[in-house]
């Protein structure tokens, strides 16, 4: 087996890292999820960036009216300077920036702004919404939970070649919390070196993806043109 892809294969891999000693399945699942959470929180990975068009906004809209995010089940957080856009279906687009949720009275009359009630899972759009349309929401998704008994591929949409890092991370957490024998003690630095090398490879891969998206664009112009004097590579 040259590459692990499934949950069952990851479980076997972690057992191998643990000198073939099994780990309680519930504990193993928690360790793997902890590893996934740590890695995904490190940066806004390109493969976790999504745009939802599941929601719409109608006029008139009150600043006290809630727009629920409950239908976007993998929503983690917004990203970008203008993470919300309103599109009328033809050529009109309005851009909305996020402002502090607890400053609702100060921003209620400020156009092109929205507030995010994280606890309630709702959006509130301030002032007058110029037209009805579809909301385009740019957000960072949370990947599906890891099933270590699955015979199907897991940790999608990350490439399978990076899946072993979950195992190295999980066993590192485990070894740091339990007693281990002399062999495991000697292997821990080596496993840590592989973990950091894999993480560096993931970071460089994601850096390249992010760079390819912006290298020929002027980030100060949201309408496709270029600022006078801007350096662009096209």
Image (cartoon, rainbow, N blue to C red):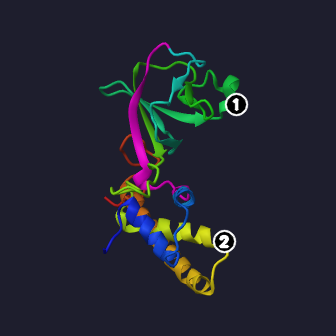
As helix, strand or loop, the secondary structure at mark 2 comes to loop
Q: Which mark is residue 102?
A: 1
Q: Residue at x 51, y 79 (%)?
A: 19
User: Is residue 50 in the magenta section?
Assistant: yes
Q: Residue at x 52, y 57 (%)?
A: 29
Quadrant of the drawing holding the C terminus: bottom left
The residue furthest top is: 60
Which residues fall within the magenta stretch? 40-60
Q: Residue at x 65, y 26 (%)?
A: 107
Judged left or right of residue 91, residue 204 is: right
Other-residue count near label 2 (Cα within 10 Å), few / some / many at <14 / 14–19 / ≥20 = few
Q: Would you name the residue on which mark 2 appears? A: 178
Judged left or right of residue 92, residue 57 is: right
**The image quarter in which residue 223 lies:** top left
User: Is residue 155 in the magenta section?
Assistant: no
> Which residue is at the front of the view, 213 or 23?
23
């Amino acid at each position: 087996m040259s590459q692990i892809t499934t949950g069952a294969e990851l479980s076997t891999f972690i057992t191998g890292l643990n000198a073939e000693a099994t780990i309680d399945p519930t504990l193993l699942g928690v360790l793997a999820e902890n590893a996934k959470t740590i890695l995904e929180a490190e940066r806004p990975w390109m493969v976790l960036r999504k745009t939802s068009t599941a929601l719409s906004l109608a006029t008139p809209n009150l600043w006290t009216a809630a727009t629920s995010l409950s239908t976007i089940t993998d929503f983690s957080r917004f990203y970008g300077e203008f993470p919300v856009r309103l599109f009328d279906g033809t050529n009109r687009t309005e851009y909305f920036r996020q402002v502090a949720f607890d400053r609702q009275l100060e921003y209620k009359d400020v156009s092109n702004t929205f507030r995010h009630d994280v606890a309630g899972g709702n959006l509130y759009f301030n002032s007058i919404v110029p037209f009805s349309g579809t909301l385009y929401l740019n957000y960072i998704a949370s990947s599906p939970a890891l099933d270590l008994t699955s015979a199907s591929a897991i940790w999608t949409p990350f490439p399978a070649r990076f899946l072993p890092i979950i195992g190295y991370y999980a066993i590192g957490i485990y070894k740091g919390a339990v007693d281990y024998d002399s062999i495991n003690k000697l292997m821990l630095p080596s496993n840590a070196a592989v973990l950091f090398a894999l993480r560096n490879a993931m970071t460089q891969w994601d850096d390249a993806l992010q760079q390819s998206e912006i290298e020929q664009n002027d980030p100060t112009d949201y309408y496709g043109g270029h600022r006078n004097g801007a350096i662009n590579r096209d």
